[in-house]
């Protein structure tokens, strides 16, 4: 065997595109020192939180998620105290959809933006709510996440209504639709549902067994998970599956540590590294997979199996000091999604502990915010016990 | 009653071809536009264009009233053109179409145009499914055509593949899909989506019963080995091959080991080949399979460990920590002689 090793090939090559990007990557400016890096990122996030240009109009229904990207980035930098926290908290609460005589609890939760014309004061439309106004699961996750990150005590959250709204979106197969007027259903919304229940510490309204069955049906022969049963294994849906199982407390029973399913999953995840991570075989490395793949490995306790220096080098090659954020590929312009996911991936893998607050991978939130969440859970339990 | 909605923006414009704001249109004078309530100090504003704000002020008003008419149908088309990701607009449009008993043929044409301009938009593909299930006499071939067109431009478009799978299931179009996957594989042997689709067809075309019968597995094994022989450095083909034998186990097919040994003569550096051989050996050990003459469990384990060590040190160094982890795990379970690690490489901890 060893005598035949003279035949070694140069290793997997992806598309020829990747070679061009590697060249640009080596030409990128060096990563600035921590203070300058933090300042540039903060400036970018504050700009995003203030106003986006007209070519971002396609984000209109998702503004809460983009706020979440920017605030989460600042949370990793431990700079949320520089924001007008109360203003943001009040804005998030203005997006809560509360039950009323005119609105069934099934529609309750959070909306992504006031784009249907809902009043900022929820009591104003209680009797005659807008007919197409309903919660969206990703907005529930983002809204609760922002409140936790900014240290809010969640006292203004109608827990029962939010959780009922989440449960109302579960399908017979165990998946979740995004919302009453957003009928698409896939693993993204299973994750959003699970993490929302996790933040509120209550899984009793959803059918956990059915969701676990659906999740497992999404694992493919490759070992990763697709968005729906039958779909191709993909980095994003694989994170959603692992995180959901872990949040539901079913990871080790659904994918036992010594099972073939678990070992195939681990193999698939580790194969996703070329230099950075990509989401499917023979796709280009993309900075957002730093989180989808990185956090998946971290959630499985296998962060130590990757090549750290290659990943970090790739991720920082996607940083643009001019923009103050991260792009999908080296040389492209920055956007809030890739900025958050590139950094959060490193934070979930604990690769940048000097620059970034670590991320609890399956909860997709900083350890600091996670601790705050746990304190709220304890306080609620103590309060319930004393009644 | 029905509209031909080929060019929605043009339909709403004046005869002279310029855009007229809704607030300047006489046939909309009865509607009071509804602005967004951004009276609070709002976060993350968007600098909408005047056209965008105007269209959506009227959309908001009509959605509040839930007016379902030809004019609101056209209004939703304008709004969709400006922001096809707004899922509520699509829901409203479906409600209008249902109330008006809308022309599904025309809607198919409209959606096709929007898909071709927004190929990675979730909402538009959902809408296509909604229309396709309501189009009388549909047999799904238009869905294969549309996804085929999108996949010609981007052979890995996830939405297109999901839609194609939906159409195959819904309209029972299994027959010719294997040939389609073969065509795509022939065009790009590393098109992972095509390999996945092939597995999807084989596994699901028999309904509840698995389509991976022994005959199919044997035939498809040859299919995969043929492509691997032509291009060994191809994760997709090796994964597909593994996928065929998931239920039975690699070691039940000695042909696989024979093929690998032959390939090793010229491809000793191919990481997928080395990994596959290690997997084969691990399967023999895990399931306690009878071994060939002259082989013992110890010798098989030792060979597997040498392969994993080669992967870690030479053939797939980016994954060296992973391969050493696999080696450590195999050694713990089955013994064998561990090759000596080079200086500087650390055995990752097992849990």
Image (cartoon, rainbow, N blue to C red):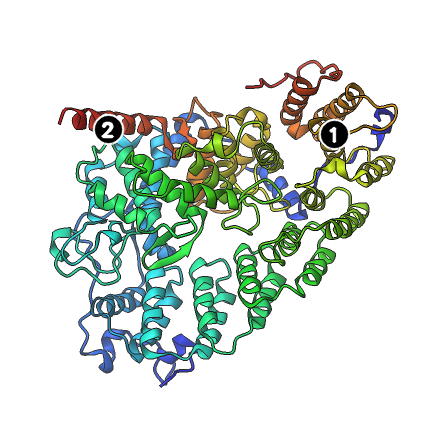
Q: Which chain carries label 2?
A: A
- The N terminus of chain B sits in image quarter: bottom left
Secondary structure of the residue carrying tag 1 is: helix
Residue A174 visible in the current orientation: yes
Badge 2 crowding class, 10 Å Cα cut-off, few under 14, some 14 to 19, many 20 or more, is many
What residue did someone put label 2 on? A376
Residue B284 circle label: 1
Q: Nearer the viewer, mark 1 or mark 2?
A: 1
Q: Where residue B86 appears, x then y in whole percent? A: 36, 60
Residue found 65% across the figure and 29% down from its top:
B319
Answer with the quarter of the image where residue A341 lies. top left
* Side (left or right) of A132 relative to A340: left
Answer with the quarter of the image where residue B278 lies. top right
Q: Do marks 1 and 2 share a chain?
A: no
Q: Where residue A275 appears, x then y in whole percent? A: 61, 35
Residue B6 visible in the current orientation: no
Query: Along the line of sight, which residue is nearer the eye, A162 or A77?
Result: A162
Residue found 34% across the figure and 34% down from its top:
A74
Q: Where residue B2 appears, x then y in whole percent? A: 38, 83
Badge 1 crowding class, 10 Å Cα cut-off, few under 14, some 14 to 19, many 20 or more, is many
Q: Is residue A150 above or below residue B104?
A: above
Q: Where residue B23 appears, x then y in whole percent? A: 23, 74
Secondary structure of the residue carrying tag 2 is: helix
Spatial separation of the CA atoms under disc 1 and disc 2: 52 Å
Residue found 24% across the figure and 50% down from its top:
A108
Residue found 25% across the figure and 45% down from its top:
A162
Query: Along the line of sight, which residue is nearer the eye, B31 or B95?
Result: B95
Q: Is residue A340 above or below residue B168?
A: above
């Amino acid at each position: 065997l060893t005598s035949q090793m003279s035949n070694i090939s140069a290793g997997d090559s992806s598309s020829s595109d990747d070679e061009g990007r590697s060249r640009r990557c080596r030409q990128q400016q060096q990563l600035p020192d921590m203070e300058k890096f933090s300042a540039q990122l903060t400036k970018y996030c504050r700009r995003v939180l203030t106003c986006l240009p007209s070519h971002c109009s396609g984000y209109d229904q998702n503004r809460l998620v983009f706020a979440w990207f920017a605030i989460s980035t600042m949370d990793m930098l431990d700079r949320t105290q520089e924001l007008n926290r109360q203003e943001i908290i009040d804005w998030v609460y203005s997006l809560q959809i509360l039950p009323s005589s005119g609105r069934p609890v099934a529609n309750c939760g959070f909306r992504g933006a006031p784009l249907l014309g809902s009043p900022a004061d929820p009591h104003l439309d209680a009797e005659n709510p807008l007919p197409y106004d309903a919660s969206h699961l990703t907005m529930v996750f983002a809204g609760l996440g922002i409140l936790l990150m900014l240290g809010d005590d969640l006292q203004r959250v109608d827990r029962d209504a939010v959780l009922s709204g989440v449960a109302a979106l579960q399908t017979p197969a165990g998946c979740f639709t995004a919302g009453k007027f957003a009928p698409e259903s896939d693993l993204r919304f299973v994750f959003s549902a699970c993490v929302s229940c996790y933040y509120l510490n209550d899984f009793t309204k959803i059918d956990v067994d059915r969701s676990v069955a659906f999740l497992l049906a999404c694992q493919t022969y490759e070992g990763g998970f697709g968005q729906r049963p039958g779909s191709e294994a993909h980095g994003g849906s694989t994170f959603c599956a692992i995180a959901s199982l872990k949040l539901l407390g079913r990871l080790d029973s659904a994918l036992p540590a010594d099972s073939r399913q678990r070992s195939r999953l681990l193999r698939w995840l580790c194969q996703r590294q070329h230099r950075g991570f990509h989401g499917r075989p023979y796709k280009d490395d993309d900075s957002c997979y730093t989180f989808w793949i990185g956090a998946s490995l971290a959630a499985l306790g296998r962060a130590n199996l990757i090549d750290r220096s290659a990943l970090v080098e790739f991720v920082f090659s996607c940083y643009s000091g001019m923009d103050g954020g991260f792009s999908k590929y080296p040389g492209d312009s920055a956007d809030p999604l890739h900025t958050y996911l590139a950094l959060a991936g490193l934070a979930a893998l604990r690769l940048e502990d000097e620059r970034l607050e670590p991320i609890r991978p399956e909860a997709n939130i900083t350890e600091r915010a996670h601790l705050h969440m746990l304190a709220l859970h304890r306080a609620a339990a103590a309060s319930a016990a004393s009644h | 009653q029905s509209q031909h909605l080929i060019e929605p923006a043009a339909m709403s414009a004046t005869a002279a071809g310029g855009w007229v704001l809704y607030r300047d249109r006489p046939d909309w004078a009865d509607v009071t536009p509804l602005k967004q309530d951004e009276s609070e100090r709002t976060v993350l504003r968007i600098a909408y264009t005047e056209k965008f704000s105007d269209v959506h002020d009227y959309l908001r008003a009509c959605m509040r009233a839930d007016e379902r008419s030809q004019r609101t149908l056209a209004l939703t088309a304008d709004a969709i053109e400006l922001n096809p990701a707004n899922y509520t607009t699509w829901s409203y449009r479906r409600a209008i179409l249902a109330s008006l008993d809308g022309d599904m043929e025309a809607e198919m044409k409209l959606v096709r145009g929007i898909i071709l301009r927004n190929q990675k938009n979730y909402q538009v593909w959902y809408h296509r499914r909604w229309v396709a299930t309501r189009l009388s006499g549909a047999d799904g071939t238009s869905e294969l055509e549309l996804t085929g067109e999108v996949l010609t431009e981007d052979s890995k478009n996830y939405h297109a593949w999901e839609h194609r799978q939906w159409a195959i299931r819904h309209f029972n179009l299994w027959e010719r899909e294997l040939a389609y996957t073969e065509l795509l594989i022939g065009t790009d042997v590393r098109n992972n989506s095509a390999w996945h689709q092939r597995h999807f067809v084989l596994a699901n075309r028999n309904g509840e019963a698995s389509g991976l019968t022994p005959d199919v597995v044997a035939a498809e094994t040859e299919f995969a080995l043929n492509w691997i022989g032509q291009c060994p450095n191809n994760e997709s083909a090796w994964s597909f091959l593994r996928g065929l034998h998931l239920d039975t186990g690699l070691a039940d097919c000695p042909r696989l080991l024979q093929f690998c040994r032959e390939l090793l003569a010229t491809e000793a550096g191919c990481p997928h080949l080395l990994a596959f051989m290690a997997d084969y050996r691990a399967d023999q050990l895990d399931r306690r399979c009878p071994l060939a003459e002259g082989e013992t469990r110890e010798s098989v384990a030792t060979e597997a460990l040498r392969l994993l060590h080669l992967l870690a040190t030479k053939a797939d160094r980016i994954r060296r920590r992973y391969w050493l982890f696999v080696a450590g795990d195999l050694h713990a379970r089955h013994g064998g002689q561990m090759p000596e690690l080079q200086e500087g490489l650390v055995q990752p901890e097992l849990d």
